[in-house]
Every structure is written in structure tokens, then in C-alpha cells.
DNA sequence: CTAGTGCACTGGTCGGACCAGTAGGCTACG
DNA sequence: CGTAGCCTACTGGTCCGACCAGTGCACTAG
């Protein structure tokens, strides 16, 4: 023992080093969204690697949502502003391959949504409160119109709440998980009668939550929102898994 | 108007179609983790594209964490079991480029952690409770030993809680966000005196949470955990942003 | 002054080539 | 007969050169 500690040699691929450098430039702010990378032929000179290597690096960067390239564009690849698209992608595959149950997803939404509402009840502006109210009004108007309009108004409501929570991470995660849940649920949509009853119930719940927020009672609003989410989705969740959701209700 | 609705032709890159097919095979279960893809030269025959195209597709799949390839391996690329690595990656870049503040991250942890504790208080087994107790004991023993051991014991505690919550999504997100927070905080570590006081305080808090869970009082345990997290991290959070964290305390 | 045409780029794809690894069969030696 | 060592047939990683189909811009012809 003693003597120098040898580390296992980690062979670093050439394209990985290209990725690292470009990634670092983007995250450090040296390259900001909207700016262009040099062309592939220019990059292969700067990095002194072949175009194949440059292209593989660009594919990785593109898969990570950092850049986008268009054929024929006289400029190089474009640096993109961050979008939760890759977060969404990886969470979606997580949901599929890792066997996330609908119950777990809904439970996660209950947690995030009620927390956002708790925060929003204390931090929201009056303008945001008005936005929420008009979203609920849109929901009411959409009962007859069709399910698309109702869903959109519902999403709009929760979007305002998420924004009002002041936490971008909560906002993004709610957005991602919500769309996954909606996709799962849309595959087994309830029949028309149930749907209309569900919609009316949901509107009532939203109004209650809104009232509680208006009154500044965050904990109440949060509790109501959990109950609302449960009532809305319980029918889609296998009976055996509902117990986990009930554990979140008071 | 009227007439056929023409959609804009979406030029699909060759490598994208390769990605789609392989991805579909993996997510449908036709290819399960541990299995091998055909070699690149074999794939270029099956898809009748060039090797460059196959390789770009493999780079994308690798960036998504679905496969891994090793040079010299007589088999092709290996199909990987899902790991939260790409989720972690995208959330990390989110934290960096999208300017997530430490306050937002800690707030997110407060939400997830307290929810996990709330669930765990009702769903945990006795064995898991014992694991938590031994983790706290390890924390106590580690105060003198060093900061690494303390941190590991702390992580172990929250890991058991996350598992006991029964929600894999919560578990994974907690893991990801926790490591990001720890990385941010480790850069501005408190000086030794404060640290020891923090550790002792943290242990006391963990014991209180543990007691509440033992008593089956989930809401109390959850409230205590939020308070504990706040006390532990408030010192690292700029004063102006602490208000958002306080909004989660009762 | 404008409409139209090229040209000089871009990224996407292809094919071939070489290298450095690895695994497993084969051989030659003990 | 058993084994240590070599040899070969693969693998992925990298490079090169070529061609195509787009795009934007300058230039030209009306």
C-alpha cells in the first residue's frame, strides 16, 4: 500500500470533448440563445476533428435540447433557449419503461398542485387571481362546448397557479407530469354522462379552491385541491391503488 | 376553401427514423435491458442506411440513456435499464441555464420531502422504520468522524423515506434535486463551528420527525421536516428569498 | 427599380478506409 | 492432457472525400 493512487484510465471519446466544450460555452453564457454555432466544416477545423465527429457531437447536443440545426441554413446550428422538452422526454420514458402507475403520477400531481396552491395563496397578485377566476369561467362556459375547451381552461387555471407559486421548478414539473397524465387518461376516457357530471363537479371544486385562495387560506385551498384531484381521477385509478392517494387526504 | 387539407411536409431525417424504430422496440419491451443491438454494420444493412446515419442514431439513443456502446465489444450496443441519469442531466442544465435559485430548489425539496414523509408515516413497514432509526444513529456517530459520513447517513435516511413513500416518481425526483442542492451548497460550505451546530440541530430534527412517524402522525412529521429543511438551508439562501421558503411553514 | 437567376454556402447522407480495442478459438508448449 | 500464449475476426471510434438538396444573397437582365 501507499504509493500513488492510480485511477482507471477513462478513454474520452473525441465527440464527447466537443460536446463538453460547446456545452460549457452555452451554460457559461458565452453562447446565448439565438446565437449561431460555426458551421460543421468550420467546427471541424477549430476542434481539428473530422466532420463525422463534429456531427455526432451536434447530435448529442441536439438530443439534449441545447441546439438545433436546419439544412440549408447559411449559418451554423442555432443555440436554443432552455425548454423543458428534454425533461419532458426523459420523464415520459421514465413513465413508460419504469412502469410508473397512473396512481403514482396522480399522487405526484396532488403533491405539486396543492403545494403550488399553498404558495400561490400567499404570493399571488390580484391580476393572477383574476386570471384564475376567468379560467374557471371559461371552464363553466365550456361544459356545453366540448371537452377540448374544458381541458384547455382547466390547464390555464393550473398554469396561472403554477406561475403564481413563484417556483419555476414546480411550474415545469407540473406541466410535464400533467401532460403525461392527460395522455394516459385520454386513452380511456369516461363516457359522456359521467364526463359531464365530472366536469360540473370539477368546476365546483375549482370555485371552492378559488374562494379559499381569495380568502388567503392557503392550507384550506391546498386541502381542497387534493380532494378535487382525487375525485377527478379516482375513477381512472385501479381500486387497489387508490389507498395511496387517500393517504394524502386529511 | 374546402378541398384537401395539405399538411406541411415534415422532412424526417434518416437517423431519426432509426432512432424511432429502436426506441419503439425498447419501450414496447421487444428489446429488454441487457440485450444487445446488432452491430453497427449489421444495423446499416437492416435499415439500409450508411454507418454514419446508424452512428448518429446511436448517439441520440445513448444521449437519452437507452443504450450504451463499448469499443471492442464483440456484441453490439447494450440496452440499458432505465436510470434517472438523463432526468438528472436535464434537470441540472435546467438549474444552470434557466437560473433556478437555490431557494427554489430547496423549496422543491421541502415539498417533496415532507410529502414523502407524510406518505411514509402511513405506509412504512417496521423494517423501514428501523432503517431510518439506524440512519439517524449513523448521523449521530458521524458528527465527530467527518462531514462525508454525516452526509451519507443523512442521504440514507431520506432514501428510506422516499422508498417507504411508495412513489417511484417522488423517489427519483428527490434523489435528483437533492444531489443538485448538495452540489450547490458544497461550494459554499459553512465554517467548522457552524457546521457542527448545524449537524447537531439536524440530528435533533431527524429524531423528532422519526418520533412523529413512529407515532403515526404524518402531518406532524411532515411539518417538522419542512421546518428542519428550512433551518438547515436557510443560512445558504439569500435573505431576500427566504420569504418564499417561510410560506411553506405553518 | 425590380424580377429572376446563379452561386456559394449550409446540413444530410453515403461509401470506404484505418485504428485500437476485445473475445474466443487455436496452437504450441509444458 | 492441460494450459499459456498467440491470432484472427470481429467490435466501435475516427477520418476522409464525395454528392445531394436545400437556403440566402448578390448579381444580373429586363
Image (cartoon, coloured by chain):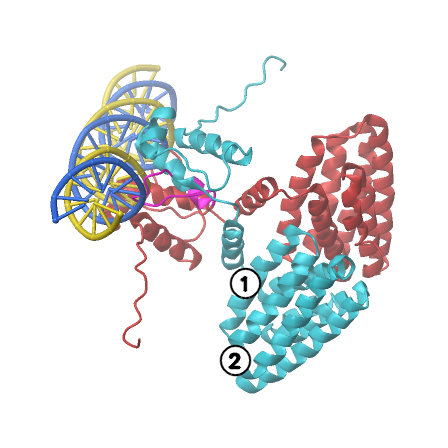
Chain colours: A cyan, B red, C yellow, D blue
Indicate the secondary structure of the residue bearing disc 1.
Answer: helix
Indicate the secondary structure of the residue bearing disc 2.
Answer: loop
Give residue A98's position: percent from left, percent from top: 53, 56
Q: Chain of mark 2?
A: A
Mark 1 Cα shell of 10 Å, populated few (<14), some (14-19), many (≥20): some
Occupied quadrant, residue B122? bottom right
Occupied quadrant, residue B60? top left
User: Residue at image x 51%, y 67%?
Assistant: A183
User: Residue at image x 67%, y 75%?
Assistant: A231
User: What's drawn in magenta, residue-wise?
Assistant: A61-76
- Reading the image, the residue beneath label 1 is A179
Q: Is residue A71 magenta?
A: yes
Mark sitting on residue A146: 2
Q: Is residue A88 magenta?
A: no
Is residue B201 visible from the viewing direction of this image?
yes
Is residue A250 visible from the viewing direction of this image?
no
B224 to B137, vertically: above or below: below
Mark 2 Cα shell of 10 Å, populated few (<14), some (14-19), many (≥20): few
B65 to A229, vertically: above or below: above
Which of marks 2 and 1 precedes in the sequence? Answer: 2
Secondary structure mostly seen in the magenta stretch: loop
* A55 vs A134, nearest the viewer: A134
Give residue B68's position: percent from left, percent from top: 43, 41
Is residue D5 found left or right of B148 in the rendered image? left
Q: Chain of mark 1?
A: A
Give residue B156's position: percent from left, percent from top: 72, 43
Q: Residue furthest bottom?
A: A193
Give residue A117's position: percent from left, percent from top: 72, 62
Q: Residue furthest top?
A: A3
B134 to A158, vertically: above or below: above
Amino acid at each position: 500500500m501507499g504509493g500513488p493512487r492510480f485511477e482507471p484510465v477513462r478513454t474520452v471519446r473525441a465527440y464527447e470533448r466537443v460536446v463538453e466544450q460547446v456545452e460549457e460555452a452555452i451554460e457559461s453564457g458565452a453562447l446565448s440563445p439565438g446565437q449561431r454555432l460555426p458551421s460543421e466544416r468550420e467546427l471541424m477545423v477549430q476542434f481539428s476533428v473530422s466532420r463525422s465527429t463534429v456531427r455526432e457531437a451536434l447530435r448529442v447536443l441536439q438530443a439534449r435540447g441545447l441546439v438545433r440545426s436546419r439544412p440549408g441554413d447559411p449559418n451554423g446550428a442555432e443555440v436554443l433557449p432552455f425548454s423543458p422538452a428534454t425533461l419532458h422526454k426523459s420523464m415520459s420514458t421514465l413513465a413508460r419503461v419504469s412502469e410508473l402507475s397512473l396512481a403514482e403520477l396522480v399522487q405526484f400531481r396532488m403533491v405539486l398542485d396543492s403545494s403550488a396552491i399553498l404558495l400561490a395563496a400567499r404570493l399571488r397578485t390580484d391580476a393572477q387571481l383574476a386570471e384564475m377566476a376567468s379560467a374557471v369561467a371559461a371552464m363553466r362556459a365550456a361544459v356545453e362546448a366540448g371537452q377540448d375547451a374544458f381541458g384547455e381552461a382547466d390547464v390555464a387555471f393550473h398554469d396561472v397557479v403554477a406561475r403564481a407559486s413563484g417556483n419555476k421548478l414546480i411550474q415545469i414539473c407540473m406541466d410535464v407530469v400533467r401532460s403525461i397524465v392527460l395522455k394516459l387518461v385520454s386513452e380511456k376516457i369516461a363516457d359522456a354522462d359521467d364526463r359531464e357530471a365530472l366536469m360540473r363537479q370539477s368546476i365546483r371544486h375549482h370555485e371552492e379552491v378559488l374562494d379559499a385562495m381569495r380568502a388567503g387560506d392557503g392550507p384550506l385551498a391546498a386541502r381542497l385541491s387534493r380532494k378535487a384531484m382525487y375525485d377527478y381521477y379516482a375513477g381512472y385509478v385501479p381500486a387497489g391503488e387508490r389507498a395511496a392517494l387517500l393517504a394524502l387526504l386529511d
